[in-house]
Amino acid sequence: MKSYRKELWFNVPTRRAFINITSQVQECLHESGISEGLILVNAMHITASVFINDDESGLHYDYEVWLEKLAPHEPVSQYRHNVGEDNADAHLKRQVMGREVVVAVTDGQLDFGTWEQIFYGEFDGGRKKRVLVKIIGE
Ligand code: ZN
């Protein structure tokens, strides 16, 4: 069995953003030389997500509105976590959008369903953060 590990780095200038990282993950897969197996992609921070969905701007806008309704950033004083920091909403948003995805690797390709793409969800940007890509197989 082969195994591959890489960290992808992001420094998102805005507080929140969704970034399509599918091509970067595909690059990792090609680098790994693995053609049958599993690929894990996870955020290495508790205020960021990795998730799979459609690359459609209307949907991304809807996520932003929905997440702000569920866990509004302001007023920051509404959260007990916000003692000396202001990112409680980012922890909650990350919980809803998830930590990681696992995708099957078949014939050297990401074995996606229709319209599936991999996204990095940033909820507390303005600093360097990492995503782990781990691939196992042969
Ligand atoms: Zn925090």
Image: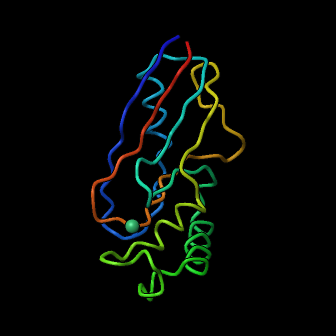
The answer to whether residue 92 is above or below residue 134 is below
Instruction: Give percent across and percent down for residue 126.
Output: 29, 65
Percent position of residue 22, x then y: 50, 42
Report the image quarter containing ligand 1: bottom left
At horizontal 43% and vertical 74% (from top left) the residue drawn is 81
Q: What residue lies at 60% left-to-right and 31% top-to-bottom?
A: 110
Residue 56 vs residue 114: left or right? left
Q: How is the image coloured?
A: rainbow
**Front residue (pair 66, 70):** 70
Image vertical order of residue 64 relative to residue 56, above or below = below
Quadrant holding the C terminus: top right
Q: Nearer the viewer, residue 121 or 98?
A: 98
For the residue pair 107 and 123, the one nearer the viewer reads as: 123
- Pick whichever, 84 or 123, lies toward us: 84
- Classify 105 as above or below 17: above
Left or right of 18: which side holds 57? right
Q: Residue at x 45, y 73 (%)?
A: 88
Q: Which percent across, then down, holds residue 114? A: 72, 44
Query: Which residue lies at the image location 47% right of the left edge and 53% below the top edge?
Result: 120
Which picture quadrant has residue 12?
bottom left
Spot occupied by residue 57 in the image (x, y as percentages of width and height): 57, 65
- Count of numbered circles on the image: 0
Residue 8 sits above or below residue 79 on the image: above
User: What residue occupies the far right of the structure in this picture?
Assistant: 114
